Amino acid sequence: MTNTAARSARLALVGDRSPNVVSHTRIPLLLDAVAARDRIILDAYWIPSEEAGDEDAVRGFDAVWMVPGSPYRSEAGVLAAIRTARVAGIPFLGTCGGFQHALLEYARDVCGLTRAAHAENDPDADDPLIEPLACSLVGHEAVVHIEAGTLAQSVTGSERTVERYFCAYGPSRHLDTLRAHGLRFSGHDEDGHVRIAELPGHPFFLASLFQPELSGDGSRPHPIVRALARAAVEHAARSRGLSV
């Protein structure tokens, strides 16, 4: 077994790729930086949201990154990809819109809140789980407090971090129900609003309303991105019966 084989993995980037979305242009730079810094080669494939609903769209990948860029062209496709990653134990990262839809998938498919909706996709919904933020975070940078003993804390190595946002929507209701069904909200802003979610018991399931891909200039990948890469390599090794 070569070192290259042991340190490579397949990554599904789910979302509607656009040169106008800054995070989309950053991701290839981050993957190059991970390769240089951690000697992990992530073989990345972009999967448009319309194709993500296919039964095997993300099955067989070692990690799924639900990237920003909502509203997605297919909400159903995005939710299907998240469901597959969650149920099949595939390492998952959702950022910005990916965070929002990870909560939506969990609310509908785990908590039974079948009418839960994203107001950006359905502004007239009776039960919007994701609604416009009271103050838009587009272009903002803010402190996030992280709970000790969580995946988020182990990944970042800190209980306080400053992160960049580019979003105008966030969770507004049913948070107690999501908690009661096993989802953990491990990061909050200064006012106590949820900013990170994770799923205990899953190999790696992490979602953030902020965009770690916007950290710095792209030459030093955010700890969350590096952690996803490590989780992907571990998944690849397990799948092939190898040791990392």
Image (cartoon, grey):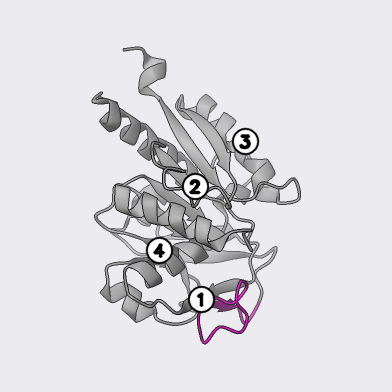
- The residue that label 1 is drawn on is 117
As drawn, 12 above or below 79? above
Identify the magenta region: 118-135
Q: Nearer the viewer, mark 3 or mark 2?
A: 2
Q: Is residue 96 visible?
A: no
Residue at x-position 64% and y-position 56%:
69
Helix, strand, or loop for circle 2? strand
Task: Identify which amino acid the numbered label 1 is placed on.
Answer: Ala
Decide which of tag 4 and tag 1 comes sooner along the chain: 1
Marks 4, 1: nearer the viewer: 1
Mark 4 secondary-structure assignment: strand
Question: Which is in the foreground here, disc 3 or disc 1?
Answer: 1
Residue 229 position in % (x across, y down):
43, 37
Q: CA distance from mark 1 to mark 2?
A: 21 Å
* Residue at left offset 47%, top offset 48%: 54
Task: Please tell me whether mark 3 sits on a helix, a strand or a loop.
Answer: helix
Mark drawn on residue 197: 4
Question: How far, Cα to Cα, is label 3 from label 1?
Answer: 31 Å
The kind of secondary structure element at disc 1 is strand
The residue that disc 3 covers is 28
Discs 3, 2 touching: Cβ within 8 Å:
no
Total marks in image: 4
Residue drawn at point x = 34 percent, y = 74 percent: 178
The stretch drawn in magenta includes residue 125: yes
For residue 132, say whether it is visible: yes
Estimate the x, y position of residue 145 in percent, counting from the top left: 44, 66
